[in-house]
Image (cartoon, grey):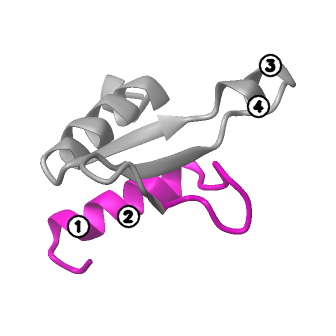
């Protein structure tokens, strides 16, 4: 397993890519305390509006879903 496959490495790469589009990846720390992995959301920096990961409940997106969203932005699909 290479380092680029670790979750921390993936998160750093996703955050850098999202920042190019004026977005911030947020992680719910409260869920981690309960023993569950923290969920994620993507926020637009200028308006502070959540653009992904808030439906059906806040911080409901997984790391894979956030990665797919950002990859779609980079491919020009969003």
Which residue is the site of mark 2? 69
Q: Earlier in the sequence, mark 3 or mark 1?
A: 3
**Decide: marks 1, 2 in contact (CB < 8 A)?**
yes
Which residue is the site of mark 3? 33
Q: In terms of depth relative to the viewer, which is nearer, 76 or 47?
A: 47
Quadrant into which the C terminus falls: bottom left
Q: Quadrant of residue 9?
A: top left
How far apart are the alpha carbons under marks 2 and 4?
22 Å
Q: Earlier in the sequence, mark 2 or mark 4?
A: 4
Is disc 4 placed on a helix, strand or loop? helix
Q: Quadrant of residue 54?
A: bottom right
**Decide: marks 3, 4 in contact (CB < 8 A)?**
yes
Q: Residue furthest bottom?
A: 77
How far apart are the alpha carbons under marks 3 and 2?
26 Å
Magenta stretch holds residue 50: no
**Decide: marks 2, 4 in contact (CB < 8 A)?**
no
How far apart are the alpha carbons under marks 3 and 4?
5 Å
Which residue is the site of mark 1? 73
34 vs 51, left or right, is right
Is disc 1 placed on a helix, strand or loop? helix
Q: How many C-alpha atoms fall within 10 Å of the one at disc 3: few (<14), some, or many (≥20)?
A: few
Q: Above or below — where is 58 with respect to 8?
A: below
For residue 31, the mark is 4
Magenta stretch holds residue 54: yes
Q: Which residues are magenta?
A: 52-78
Is disc 3 placed on a helix, strand or loop? helix
Residue plotted at (48% across, 62% down):
52
């Amino acid at each position: 397993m290479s380092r680029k496959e670790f979750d921390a490495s993936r998160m750093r790469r996703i955050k850098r890519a999202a920042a190019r589009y004026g977005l911030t990846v947020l992680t719910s720390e409260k869920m981690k305390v309960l023993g569950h992995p923290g969920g994620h959301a993507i926020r637009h920096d200028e308006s502070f509006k959540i653009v992904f990961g808030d439906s059906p409940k806040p911080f409901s997106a997984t790391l894979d879903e956030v990665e797919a969203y950002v990859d779609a932005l980079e491919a020009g699909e969003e």
